Amino acid sequence: MTIPMIWGILAVVSVTITDTFFVGQLGTLPLAAMGFVFPIAMVMFSLGIGLSAGAASVIARTIGGSSREEVRRLATDALSLSFIISVLFVLVGISTIDPVFRMLGAKDDTLPLITAYMTPTYIGIIFLIVPMTGNSVLRACGDAKWPAMIMIGSAGINAVLDPILIFGLLGMPRMEIAGAAWATMIARLFILFSVFAILHFRERLISNLWPGLKTFTASARKILHIAIPAAMNQMLNPLAMALLTAMVATFGTGAVAAFGVATRIEA
């Protein structure tokens, strides 16, 4: 399972590097906007990693000693919980773009670019966290190959769409930095559909029946018992990165742009 996971991780990393490469051709200000955005994007990933860890742990233990129906119930509840948390994150994120990024040191020249990028990015968090949870369910069931292949396919879609949407190629409107966000969102939508197709049609792990609030709450409690500590642990690095970004911002947008490129390559 290790080799497919390595390829999947490399695919995820390639998305951020690809975005940075094409956005960098727009100039310093868009690249600085990407620098401000990166810590928040990593917080979103941390949330997804936490929920994925919780779902994978609970489901892996359940597979060994419970019925297939119980596994199906937990898998469905994990996806539902991820969706609910994602929607809450969308609402909070979109409504706090201005104050959060001003706190990070963004000025009036970069805030419009940040808003243009973060609005579709926040909306697309549903297409990030829910598929991450779905992939963790597949890995808990012993399938690491398909999650990796899906991530590689998604990275390929993002690489193709980036220049088309950013620069307005093939008759598409020139969206500049927002195009990078929309390209990533579409690529993640591919992940969502692919993961759901495998979970539903091959693994038969998605239930169409509402279990009742009591059962769902019990499942959510099991998952969050692991997910919350895991997410908090993962968030230490992006929070430190946010603090460093705010410090670097005192030296100007050029410094933020350079720091943003360096952190994306390092990550």
Image: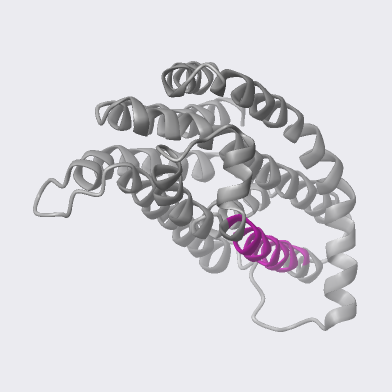
Residue 74 in view here: yes
In the current view of this chain or complex, which residue is farthest to the front?
108
Q: Foreground residue, 91 or 152?
A: 91
Foreground: 191 or 83? 83
Residue 189's x, y, as percent?
43, 57
22 relative to 103 in the view: left or right: left
The quarter in which the C terminus is drawn is top right
Does 90 lie within the magenta span?
yes
Vertical order, 81 against 238 (above or below): below
Q: Is residue 267 visible?
A: no
Instruction: Residue 33 in the image: state x and y as whole percent.
Output: 44, 35
Residue at horizontal 53%, vertical 55%?
A: 122
- Give the main secondary structure, helix, strand or loop, of the magenta stretch: helix
- Quadrant of the image for the N terminus? top right
- Describe residue 196's horizontal placement relative to residue 159 as left or right: right
Side of 27 relative to 212 (left or right)? left
Q: Position of residue 27 (x, y in %)?
A: 28, 27
- Residue at 36% x, 52% y is 182
At a point 50% along the width and 38% down the height, the residue shown is 148
Q: Which residues are magenta?
A: 74-93
Q: Is residue 202 above or below residue 264?
A: below
Residue under the image location 34 percent in, 48 percent down: 178
Quadrant hosting residue 200: bottom right
Q: Looking at this view, is 204 or 178 the one in front? A: 178
93 versus 210 height, above or below? above
